[in-house]
């Protein structure tokens, strides 16, 4: 058993990713962002991604649209979609669910 809020704080302008569960086509990670001032760009090539903010606030840009997220907000990011974490306010704790696309038969 693990507590989602029991973590080491990353350096300012950095993030820590911790895998909590990994099964067949799904990986669940805790992400901790510490006061990001430098935008961070991400691309999950073969995985859909659903994230929820558990603590804190962040600005995330997807397809030119800026999403302001606060605790309790979630967003779905399809595979092969570039997204940029523009800024966080202090520490943000996320829960990320990554779903690998199933191979076609």
Image (tube, helix red, strand yellow):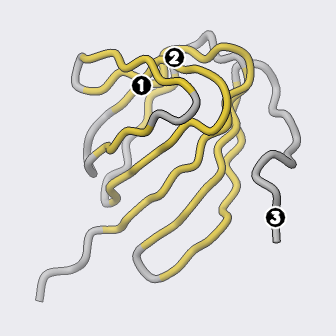
Residue 46 lies, with reference to residue 21, above or below; the image says above
Q: Nearer the viewer, residue 50 or 22?
A: 50
Marks 3 and 2 sit apart, C-alpha to C-alpha, by: 30 Å
Mark drawn on residue 39: 2
Question: Which quarter of the rendering shows the C terminus?
Answer: bottom left
Badge 1 or badge 2: first in the primary sequence: 2
Give the secondary structure at mark 1.
strand
The image quarter containing residue 99 is bottom left
Total number of numbered labels?
Answer: 3
Marks 1 and 2 sit apart, C-alpha to C-alpha, by: 6 Å
Mark drawn on residue 2: 3
In the picture provided, is 102 more to the left or to the right than 47?
A: left
Q: Nearer the viewer, residue 3 or 49?
A: 3
Category of crowding for the residue at label 3, using alpha-carbon neighbours closer than 10 angstroms: few (below 14), some (14–19), many (at least 20): few
Give the secondary structure at mark 3.
loop
Residue extending farthest front: 72
Badge 3 or badge 1: first in the primary sequence: 3
Residue extending farthest left: 105
Give the secondary structure at mark 2.
loop
In the picture provided, is 63 more to the left or to the right than 60?
A: left
Q: Position of residue 96 (x, y in %)?
A: 52, 51
């Amino acid at each position: 058993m693990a507590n989602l809020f029991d973590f080491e704080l990353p350096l300012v302008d950095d993030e820590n990713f911790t895998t909590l569960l990994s099964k067949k086509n799904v990986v669940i990670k805790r992400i901790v962002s510490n006061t990001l001032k430098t935008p961070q760009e991400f691309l999950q090539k073969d995985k859909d991604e659903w994230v929820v903010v558990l603590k804190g606030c962040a600005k995330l840009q997807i397809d030119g649209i800026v999403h302001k997220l606060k605790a309790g907000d979630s967003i779905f990011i399809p595979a092969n979609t570039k997204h940029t974490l523009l800024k966080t306010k202090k520490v943000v704790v996320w829960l990320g669910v990554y779903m690998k696309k199933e191979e076609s038969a």
